[in-house]
């Protein structure tokens, strides 16, 4: 079936799809025209593959199933979250147009960052990116989905991302041996268990009104989520008032603003303070001078 969604004038589907590496991780997939394909498990338990493509009037969503009114509503809410359709970047674009290093970003209508349907999924993906090569991250995610995700009824080779309840049934050894997660295994087990049991409601953070420092502290209470992972999760939550500082940030900020001299994380943060609530986005989409 087909559903049409309206978008803001500053929205670009390819810009969201290519905003970061999530599109390379199953069950995400990029369509040849810059659109999105994804396999989702709806709350009723059915697994659906949907595609999103840009059309003149907005977005066209096609699914593999005929959905009820309630299921259509859930799918629309899911896609709205994944693509950041609810976000208004007008204020940021006004500021960014005055900065040559962000001019290309404004032209591309970039700014929105591709999200998973749930914060649980985004936390798992983020944990899998820590201290490893990107190819290993992709492999861990692929195996996790293949082994524990519900299959698409029309193609059992394709799966949705596993639910917390399903992952909570496994133990640390399973993730170490079958997924090759290494030290990340207990983090994934713990997260699945506290979410599945209701001890932690991650999805509440999507609409949290907590100030950024407090929300960051809450995210860092999750076992396996350090400062850098929390900063990335804040971006995914649409909270852009913090810069994710890692070795790459230290390198590019040093080259761009400090003549290549060694700098501290505090200097990175100070460099983008003037962007206020948008400093994370300004950093993320800066046209870096890379040596």
Image (cartoon, helix red, strand yellow):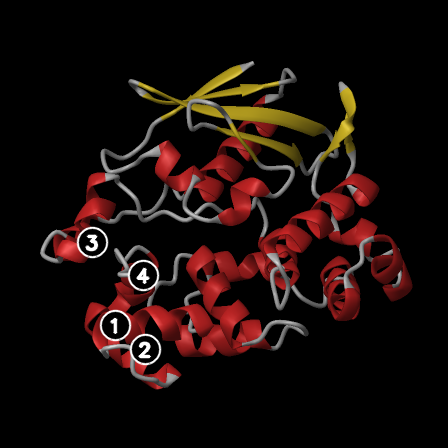
Q: Residue furthest left?
A: 98
When the figure is inspected, residue 286 is found, relative to residue 263, above or below; the finding is above
Mark closer to the chain start, 4 or 3: 3
When the figure is inspected, residue 50 is found, relative to residue 262, above or below; the finding is above
When the figure is inspected, residue 269 is found, relative to residue 84, above or below; the finding is below
Give the CA distance from mark 2 to mark 4. Answer: 16 Å
Out of 289 and 291, give the one closest to the viewer. Answer: 291
Element type where label 1 sits in the image: loop
Q: Residue at x 40, y 44 (%)?
A: 84
Quadrant in the picture for residue 202: bottom right
Pointer 2 residue: 268
Element type where label 2 sits in the image: helix
Out of 72 and 265, give the one closest to the viewer. Answer: 265
From the top left corner, tell me how far across and down residue 2 is, in percent: 51, 15
The label shown at residue 272 is 1
Q: Which residue is drawn at 20% across and 40% down?
A: 107
Circles 1 and 2, Cβ within 8 Å, touching? The answer is: yes
Q: Which residue is drawn at 76% across and 71% down?
A: 183
Pointer 4 residue: 290
Circles 3 and 1, Cβ within 8 Å, touching? The answer is: no
Give the CA distance from mark 3 to mark 1. Answer: 13 Å
Mark 3 closeness class: few <14, some 14–19, many ≥20 residues within 10 Å? many
Q: Which of marks 4 and 1 is in front?
A: 4
């Amino acid at each position: 079936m087909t559903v049409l969604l309206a978008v803001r004038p500053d929205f670009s589907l390819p810009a969201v799809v290519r905003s970061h590496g999530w599109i390379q991780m199953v069950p995400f997939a990029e369509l040849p025209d810059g659109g999105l394909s994804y396999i989702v498990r709806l709350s009723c338990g059915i697994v659906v593959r949907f595609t999103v493509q840009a059309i003149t009037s907005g977005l066209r969503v096609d699914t593999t199933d005929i959905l009820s009114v309630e299921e259509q509503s859930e799918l629309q809410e899911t896609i709205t979250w994944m693509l950041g359709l609810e976000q208004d970047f007008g204020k940021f674009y006004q500021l960014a147009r005055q900065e040559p290093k962000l001019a290309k970003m404004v032209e591309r209508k970039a700014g929105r960052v591709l999200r998973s349907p749930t914060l649980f999924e985004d936390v798992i993906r983020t944990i899998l990116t820590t201290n490893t090569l990107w190819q290993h991250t992709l492999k861990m995610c692929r195996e996790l989905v293949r082994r524990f995700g519900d299959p698409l009824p029309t193609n059992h080779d394709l799966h949705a991302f596993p639910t917390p309840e399903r992952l909570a049934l496994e133990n640390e050894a399973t993730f170490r041996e079958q997924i090759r997660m290494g030290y990340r295994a207990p983090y994934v087990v713990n997260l699945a268990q506290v979410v599945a049991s209701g001890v932690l409601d991650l999805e509440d953070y999507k609409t949290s009104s907590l100030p950024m420092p407090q929300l960051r502290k809450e995210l860092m209470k999750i076992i396996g989520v350090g400062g850098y992972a929390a900063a990335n999760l804040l971006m995914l939550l649409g909270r852009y008032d913090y810069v994710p500082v890692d070795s790459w940030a230290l390198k590019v900020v040093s080259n761009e603003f400090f003549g290549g001299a060694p700098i501290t994380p505090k200097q990175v943060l100070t460099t983008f303070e003037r962007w206020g609530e948008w400093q994370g986005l300004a950093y993320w989409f800066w046209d870096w001078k890379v040596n």
